[in-house]
Image (spheres, rainbow, N blue to C red):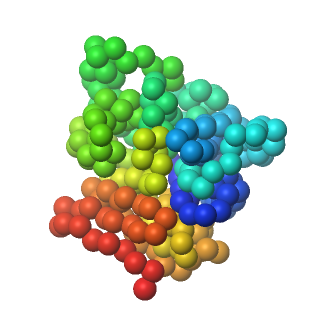
Amino acid sequence: MCGIIGYIGNNDAKAFLLDGLEKMEYRGYDSSGISVMSGNKIHTFKKRGRLQILRESLKNQQDVSGFVGIGHTRWATHGGASDINAHPQNSQSGRISVVHNGIIENYISLKNFLLEKGFKFISDTDTEVVAQLIDFYYKDNFFEAVKTAVSKLEGSYALGILCSNEPDKIIAAKKDSPLIVGIGEDENYIASDVTALISKTRKIYRLEENDIAVVKKDKVTIYSNAGKKVLDRD
Ligand code: GLU
């Protein structure tokens, strides 16, 4: 279990994500990666090894600018440390991108279900199953797709998710793995721990078990077992 970071606002997502991942390096990891939304397209870059290797590989990439993104440092539990098994993990269509800390215990049965529906997998991770499952349930509502998909998951997860059809939001979900939301000025964040956000905001909300957060640049809505709550700057 390592690090998750997410950014939505008016500034360069890539710089924020790499900086946040660097602050969480102390947690240990074997690979790292980011997905950035450019227009309606998700661009994903990931590398085995130190964050510096990811940084180097991003230097010559033109299409990595955008104002929304998610990032990850991985400590492999399912599938070895490799570029392909690094996160973000995307659905086959490229519409859904997921970063995940934790372990999906029923991933084999979910994978078999999706294989029967014609989905093809390229990694050995339990996380790719989450991305494909959300894509499977996506009709025209990102939140509903995530809600249905996470209700099928057994195990532990902190998730940060992008959907190219709804580029105005990051969705975060949590069960048995830590995840926080940070409220900024015209920008908002998700992270595994406060060290990644402390230089940006002191307004931190810790997600509770089974919470799902819809994080937009000017509004954060938390859907919990108890109902719906909107977090504001004040
Ligand atoms: N189980 C996932 C994997 O092996 C996530 C590992 C993590 O928490 O970093 O890819």
- Say which residue appears at 47% left-offset and 40% top-offset: 164
Seen as rendered, the residue at the extreme front is: 39
Q: Quadrant of the C terminus?
A: bottom left
Q: Nearer the viewer, residue 27 or 222?
A: 222
Visible residue check, residue 118? yes
The answer to whether 119 is drawn above or below residue 5 in the figure is above
Q: Nearer the viewer, residue 119 or 138?
A: 138
How many numbered circles does the render carry? Answer: 0
Visible residue check, residue 75? no
Question: Is 225 placed left or right of 115 in the picture?
Answer: left
- Say which residue appears at 41% left-offset and 34% top-offset: 131
Seen as rendered, the residue at the extreme left is: 226
- Say which residue appears at 30% left-offset and 40% top-offset: 140
- Say which residue appears at 42% left-offset and 16% top-offset: 120
Residue 179 image-quadrant placement: bottom left
The answer to whether 90 is drawn above or below residue 50 in the figure is above
Query: Residue 46: image x %, image y %?
Result: 65, 36
Query: Residue 18: image x %, image y %?
Result: 68, 54
Question: Is 155 placed left or right of 17 in the picture?
Answer: left
Query: Residue 139: image x %, image y %?
Result: 28, 35
The answer to whether 100 is drawn above or below residue 91 in the figure is below
Residue 112 image-quadrant placement: top left
Query: Residue 9: image x %, image y %?
Result: 56, 63
